[in-house]
Image (tube, rainbow, N blue to C red):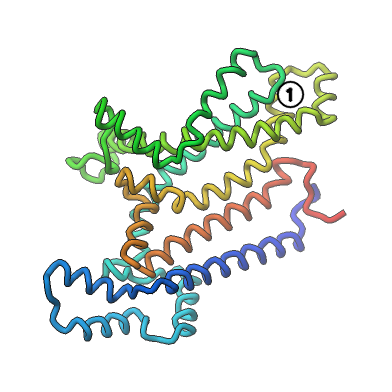
């Protein structure tokens, strides 16, 4: 590696900007393809609750003007892009006057604190199991037992979540059914509150770890099988290096490169991937907030959350691209 070249950095930043722009444009267009009107839907819910709303037609027009939905689509798009560039996510259509930014700030720590940790734990366990399955020196008994950890991979994580609730919440009464912490507790980071958060977050995290580690393991197993026949592996064995050093520094280190790219994508998309898990457990994270926005046709809330997901994914991929040569010195930023 000869350092980060300006040409490579410019190309990667250009791809980052293009990805974010295309993603932001799509999330502007897609919600507007739905036949429903978010303001009319909001007034309809008021009608269902109270039975009648005086001046509903005038209210709809006033709210459409307030949120800029009466402007031509091009004007709406330009305003939207300006707001996204300044990270002004606007007001929620269904929870006005709450701002989307404040709603995201309240929900994001729960997603990062539990589901991101679950993804990283699944990544570490799955890759370790996959590498051991492909390693020739792994004992036969261990090689026989390890595939059992992939048993639940074929089950969707939300289905496993329902099963975990049935067994451990209703059956054994070991864990709570829903929520992020006990109802009697206030949001204060003392030991009782932290213990309650861990207690409530165990089942959602477990449903993701158990069902996703198999995918990491299968991918890592294939990469390790390919790596095991490389010349540097044979040379390391001929030198008489310790098997543990060959396994971790020569085998796992080189086989992990594609897995790191997948990890960056998974961490960026974790808010969207956790929608059903957070809905089942009523967990107040980004996924549950996105579900509420979709159900209520809340354009601004959907756009704000998905824009953050796009930014997270694009930033993750950019960081991995820039860090690759530090992970594997064989990779260079310069063209040959």
Label 1 neighbour load within 10 Å: few <14, some 14-19, many 20+: some
Residue ID at (46%, 76%)? 80
User: Is 82 situated above or below 327?
Assistant: below
User: Is 331 situated above or below 224?
Assistant: below
Residue ID at (71%, 64%)? 10
Q: Name the one closer to the observer, 281 or 13.
A: 281
Quadrant position of residue 230: top right
Q: Position of residue 317 (x, y in %)?
A: 62, 53
How many numbered marks does the figure carry? Answer: 1
> Is 309 positioned to the left or the right of 282 in the image?
right
Q: Position of residue 12 (x, y in %)?
A: 68, 61
Residue ID at (64%, 24%)? 133
Residue at which label 1 appears: 246
Residue ID at (78%, 19%)? 241
> Is 22 positioned to the left or the right of 106 in the image?
right
Quadrant position of residue 156: top left
User: Is 336 situated above or below 96?
Assistant: above
Q: SS at mark 1?
A: helix
> Is 281 positioned to the left or the right of 125 in the image?
left
Q: Position of residue 175 (x, y in %)?
A: 28, 31
Q: Position of residue 250 (x, y in %)?
A: 74, 29
Q: Which residue lies furthest to the right in this view?
A: 336
Q: Name the one closer to the observer, 159 or 128.
A: 159
> Is 16 positioned to the left or the right of 110 in the image?
right
Quadrant position of residue 215: top right
Rendered-image quadrant of the C terminus:
bottom right
């Amino acid at each position: 590696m000869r350092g980060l070249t300006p040409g490579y950095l410019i190309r990667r930043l250009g791809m980052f900007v293009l990805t974010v722009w295309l993603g932001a444009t799509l999330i502007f267009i897609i919600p507007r393809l739905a036949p429903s009107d978010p303001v009319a839907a909001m007034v309809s819910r008021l009608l269902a609750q109270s039975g009648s709303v005086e001046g509903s037609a005038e209210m709809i027009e006033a709210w459409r003007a307030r949120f800029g939905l009466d402007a031509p689509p091009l004007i709406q798009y330009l305003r939207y892009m300006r707001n996204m560039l300044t990270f002004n996510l606007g007001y929620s259509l269904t929870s006005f006057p709450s701002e989307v930014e404040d709603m995201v700030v309240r929900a994001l720590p729960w997603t990062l604190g539990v589901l991101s940790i679950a993804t990283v734990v699944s990544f570490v366990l799955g890759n370790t199991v996959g590498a051991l399955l492909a390693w020739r020196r792994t004992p036969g008994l261990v090689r026989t037992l390890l595939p059992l950890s992939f048993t639940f991979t074929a089950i969707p994580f939300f289905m496993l979540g329902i099963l975990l609730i049935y067994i451990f919440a209703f059956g054994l009464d070991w864990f709570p059914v829903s929520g992020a912490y006990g109802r009697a507790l206030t949001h204060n980071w003392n030991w009782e509150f932290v213990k309650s958060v861990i207690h409530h977050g165990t089942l959602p995290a477990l449903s993701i770890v158990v069902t996703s580690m198999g995918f990491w393991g299968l991918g890592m197993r294939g990469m390790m099988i390919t790596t095991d026949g490389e010349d540097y592996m044979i040379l390391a064995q001929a030198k008489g290096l310790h098997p543990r050093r060959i396994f971790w520094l020569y085998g796992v280190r080189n086989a992990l490169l594609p897995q790191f790219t997948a990890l960056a994508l998974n961490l960026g998309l974790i808010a969207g991937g956790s929608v059903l898990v957070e809905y089942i457990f009523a967990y107040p994270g980004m996924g549950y907030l996105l579900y509420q926005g979709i159900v209520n046709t809340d354009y601004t809330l959907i756009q704000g959350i998905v824009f953050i997901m796009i930014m997270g994914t694009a930033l993750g991929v950019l960081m991995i691209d820039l860090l690759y040569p530090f992970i594997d010195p064989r990779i260079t930023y310069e063209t040959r």
